[in-house]
Amino acid sequence: MTYLWDTFRPKGIAITEFGFNPYMEFSRTVNAQRYGFERTTYYQQFLAEMMKVIYEDHVNIVAAFGWSIMDNNEFGSYEQQYALQHVNRTDPMLGRIFKRSIFDYVDFFKQRVQKTLEKYRRLGLGQ
C-alpha cells in the first residue's frame, strides 16, 4: 500500500476485495465451518495491518471490502468458500448460518470505533 501511495499519489485507495478460503472447508461439518478460526485470524491480521498503513504510514484507505458475505460459483463450483456465512444448499429455502468470522469482523471495528469515540470525548470533541 505504501508503495502505491508514494508512487502514484492517488486521492485514496479502495481495497476492493480481500478474503480467505480455508483449505477444503466445503468438506467440513457445518459446525466446523461455523466455528473455524482460520478466516477470523486472516481478517484480523489483514485489518490490523491495514490500520497500521492508515495511522503509521498515513495512507488514505477509503474502503476495504471483505470477500464475501456468501459463497458464489465464481470458480465453477461452490467448493471455494470465502463467505462469512454458511449456506445450506441441500435446503430448498437455502438456510443461512453466520460463521464466527463475521462476528469477529464486526467486533474488530466496534472496538476501534469505541476507542476513537473515547479519545474524542477525552479531548472534548465528542458529546
Image (cartoon, rainbow, N blue to C red):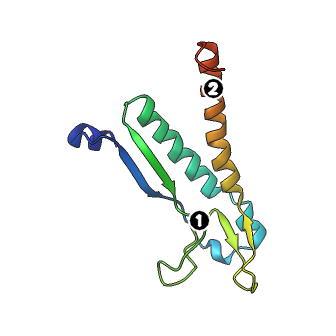
* Residue 120 pos. (x, y %): 59, 20
* Residue 87 pos. (x, y %): 69, 74
Three-letter residue code for mark 1: Pro
* Residue 78 pos. (x, y %): 57, 80
Q: Residue at x 63, y 49 (%)?
A: 105
Which of the 4 image quarters holds residue 127?
top right
Nearer to me, 27 or 86: 86
Nearer to me, 59 or 44: 59
- The disc, 1 or 2, on the residue closer to the chain's N-terminal end is 1
Quadrant of the rendering where the N terminus is positioned: top left
* Residue 56 pos. (x, y %): 42, 28
Asked if 17 appears above or below 81 in the picture, the reply is above
Residue contact between numbered discs 1 and 2, judged by CB atoms under 8 Å? no
Judge left or right: residue 8 versus residue 96.
left
Q: Residue at x 61, y 34 (%)?
A: 112
Query: Secondary structure beneath disc 1?
Result: loop
Which mark is drawn over residue 99? Answer: none
Three-letter residue code for mark 2: Leu
Disc 2: CA contacts within 10 A as few (<14), some (14-19) or many (>=20): some
Q: Residue at x 38, y 37 (%)?
A: 60
- How far apart are the alpha carbons under marks 1 and 2? 35 Å
Nearest to viewer (mark 1 / mark 2): 2
Judge left or right: residue 47 versus residue 126.
left
Asked if 49 appears above or below 35 in the picture, the reply is above
Q: Which residue is mark 2?
A: 117
Q: Residue at x 24, y 39 (%)?
A: 9
Query: Secondary structure beneath disc 2?
Result: helix
Residue extending farthest front: 127
Asked if 85 appears above or below 8 in the picture, the reply is below
Q: How many marks?
A: 2
Q: Which residue is mark 1?
A: 22
